[in-house]
Image: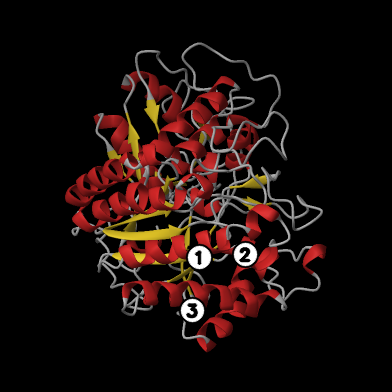
Amino acid sequence: MDNGVVHHALFLCFPFGTWRKRIFGRATGSRTPGQDLSLPARCVVPSGPSPTLSMVPARRLLGRRGTSRHPGRCNLANGGSGLAWRTDSEGKPGASERGELPVSPALSLSLPLSSLLLGPTITMRADVLIAALATGALAAAVPTIPKKPTPPKGDVSNPFVGKTQFVNPEWSNKLTQTYKSFLKKGDVKNALRTLQAQKVSTFVWVSRLSELGRIDEAIATARRVQKQTGKKQIVGLVLYNLPDRDCSAGESAGELLSGENGFERYKEEFVKPYAQKVAAAKDLEFAIVLEPDSLGNLVTNLNIPLCAGAVDVYRDGIAHAITQLQQDNVHLYIDAAHGGWLGWNDNLPLAADEFAEVLKRADEASGKKNKIRGFATNVSNYNPLHAVVRENYTEWSNSWDESNYATSLAPHLEERGLPAHFIVDQGRVALPGARKEWGEWCNVAPSGFGPAPSTNTNNTVVDAIVWIKPGGESDGECGYINAPRAGHWHDEFAQQLVENAHPSVYEKWWKFW
């Protein structure tokens, strides 16, 4: 029990006569040191002077083949499961005898399920278990003194410090399909991991005029959670509806066209109500990412006619959005593509010039100095913040992961008077070797949910790890067999994100209960 954290194990007790035979001896009622007694769950008890319970895979516990499945017995995930309880008065391994305790269908046993997720992390004194079984009471593992709250650490101007990132229920509900898919296959471990992923914060995308109502829904939910928990909410939003959007790839082309009065509609019908909604919610904080991929295309893809024709629309459109979102509770992050795109040495100063031009236009249009917090990187891409393995295709780049990209770009921004603060999308991270080229961006697999959102970034210029792109929503009809259109739910892809998820997504499983 590290740091005073209480881990609870809840038991709905069975008729004690049955338990006494199983626990204290089959016929005599005696308890033999070293004896192992099993009941349906997924646990084992280490031996020692103070018997404890902890979680391990049941197949190691049972140690025999041919274990049959019985009605009313907990058989979990490929081969059943069991709870072993070993006592050793001398603290030494002893001879063991195993028994299985049938579970009445009318009764149930509820245990912490970290064994399915992380391995041996939960411990409980065996005498506490005995007391619970004897009295039918709910048993806590050990009494502890509550931890004192720790003050926020880090940059006090960092808008994420001391706040809770908003969990988008619209995305979480989509994962219910993934959860059911795992259960249908009998994959309890990943079904439980999916439940944990549903509790992770993600940004809310507003990418069409008809989606402006998503802001109202997010505000209502965030207010309710903030009132219930007493914790300040920061709501992540994406503003994404420029005319001639996605000029290079086309998979995420939008509804507005510059040749059809798209720019005026963007300002009046999209940005204006967007800004009004967040300005009215002064009790909440907002982190807003502006127009993913747009300025990156202006740095590298002007050889594409649609991009060349969209230069002023993109620059002026983002500048206008900046001028309209200057509220104190709003923190703006301009999209800065990712390390594999703008992180090359030749592109870094060009990217900083492009960002500076947009801020200049915003200041000129409003007649005053406008503020942004910084830049968002890796939006909808698959690069790690801190690469465990350096991929071969990054050999000639100093920006071989997103942390290095932020560090490489920062001095170029500061030279131009721009803030060098970043948030990094880790909603999806490619596994080492998943890509042959850095340019592979569409539904990359194998990949997994990346590190859970946090302000512990191990880089002073990175404000926070965030999940901007909701994992499971397709990048487009590319990169993965039978991938649907961009933005549509792709459950098969979501399943492999869960299977390959970073441990931080589910390691604090007790917060779910």
> Where residue 482 appears, x then y in whole percent?
69, 28
Q: Using the image as rendered, state which of residue 43 and residue 253 is in the foreground.
A: 253
Callout in the foreground (3, 2) = 2
Q: Which mark is residue 298?
A: 2
Residue 62 seen in this snapshot: yes
Q: Which residue is mark 1?
A: 315
Residue 6 placement (x, y as % from top left): 33, 53
Quadrant of the drawing holding the N terminus: bottom left
In the picture, which quadrant includes the C terminus?
Answer: top left
Q: Is residue 200 above or below residue 332?
A: above
Real-space Cα separation, disc 1 to disc 3, in angstroms: 20 Å
Asked whether the residues under the numbered discs 3 and 2 touch, taking CB atoms below 8 Å apart as contact, a structural biologist would say no
Is 463 left, or right, of 438 in this rendering?
Answer: left
Q: Residues within 10 Å of mark 2 (few under 14, many from 20)?
A: many
Left or right of 116 in this view: 128: left
- Mark pair 3, 2: CA separation: 20 Å
State the count of labels.
Answer: 3
Disc 1 or 3, which lies upstream in sequence? 1
Give the residue at mark 3. 420
Q: Disc 2 residue type?
A: Leu
Q: Residue at x 75, y 66 (%)?
A: 390
User: Quick one: SS at disc 1?
Assistant: helix
- How much space separates mark 1 and mark 2, taking CA atoms? 9 Å
Q: Secondary structure at mark 3?
A: loop
- Pick whichever, 209 or 178, lies toward us: 209
Question: Badges 1 and 3: C-beta atoms under 8 Å apart?
Answer: no
